[in-house]
Amino acid sequence: MEPRIGIIGLGLVGGALSARLRDTGRGVVGHDISPQQEKLFRTMGGEVRPSAAAVASECGLMVLSLPTLAVSKSVVQELLPHLRPGSIIVDTTTGAPEETSELEALLAPAGVGYIEALIGGSSSLVRTGEAIAMCGGEEAVFQRCADLLRACFGQVFYLGSCGAGSRMKLILNLVLGLNRAVLAEGLAFAGACGIEPSRALEILRASPAYSRAMDTKGARMVERDFEPEARLSQHLKDVRIILSLGARSGARLPLSTLHRRLLEDAEAAGYGAADNSAIICAFSNGKGRQ
C-alpha cells in the first residue's frame, strides 16, 4: 500500500492536486484554515487533520499549496518540530526565487528535503493531469519524489538548484498572462467595432493569431463566466513579483508594467476573487461587475 501524502492548503490548486493524488492510488491527509475547504476535501475522499503539525506527524512527504511563500514559511516553522529526518516537503506556492532558497536552508539542518514544484496550468488542468511542474532543489531529493510528480503532472521539468523552478514559473506566468490580456483587448475591441465577440473568437482561433488562451479563457470572457479556476488577484501578485525580479535582473518589462496596471484596475472594480478571464473587465468603459 502506498504511503499517505500530506497536503497543507486545500483551495483551488490544493484541492485539485489532492484529487489527482488519490487517482494515483495514494491516500491523502490534509489541513486548511478554512472549514469549508476541509469539508469539501472530506466529501472528495480526503482525511482531514486538525492542524498542519498533525499532518506532518504521520506523513513523510508533504505538499504545500498556499497563497504566498510568506505563508509557506510560517507553516514550515510550525511543522519543523514534527518533521522526521528524511521527510520531504514539495512546495507548489509561487513566489520570489530567493524565498524558496531560504525555505530549503531552513529545513536542511533538520535533515528535511525541500523541492519547489511550480505548477503551469489552472486547477482544472491539475485535476486532469494536463498541468506541468517546474522543479528546483537538490537533485537527489527531487529523484526521491520524481515518480510521484510524474504521476500527477503531464510533464515534469527539473531545472536545477532551488529558485530555478520559481524563476521559470514567473517566465511562464508573464507570457501566459499577457496572452490573456491581449485576447481580452482583442475581444473588447471587436465588440466596440460592432463585431460579435463570439464570432471574433471563432475566427481568431482559426487564424495565425491563435493561442491556447483562446481555448481556456475565450468563451469565458465572451460569456462573462468568471467562476474561478485561478484568481485574478493571485496573478496580480505574481506580476508584481515578476517586475521586482526584473528590476533586480536588469530586464526591461514594459508590457508587464502595463499588465500590472490593467490587473489593478480589474481588482479595484471588484474582480480580484474572480477568474483570470475577468481581465477583460479592465477594457470595459464602465466599472464594477457586469
Image (cartoon, helix red, strand yellow):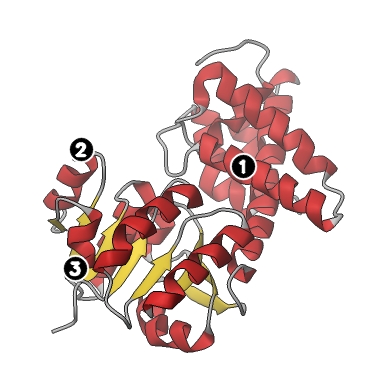
**Amino acid bearing label 1:** Glu
For disc 1, the marked residue is 202
The residue nearer to you, when weighing 226 against 218, is 226
The foreground one among 234 and 245 is 245
Q: Is residue 156 left or right of residue 184?
A: left
Q: Is residue 279 above or below residue 153?
A: above
Given residues 32 and 280, the one toward you in this image is: 32
Q: Residue at x 43, y 70 (%)?
A: 107
**Whole-percent x and y of residue 18?**
27, 61
Relative height, residue 3 to residue 234 (above, below): below
Real-space Cα distance between discs 2 and 3? 23 Å
Instruction: Give the quadrant of the N terminus.
Output: bottom left
Question: Residue sitting at 62 percent across and 61 percent down?
Answer: 97
Number of the label disc, if any, that sits on residue 36: 2
User: What residue would you read off at disc 3?
Assistant: 57
Q: Is residue 109 visible?
A: yes
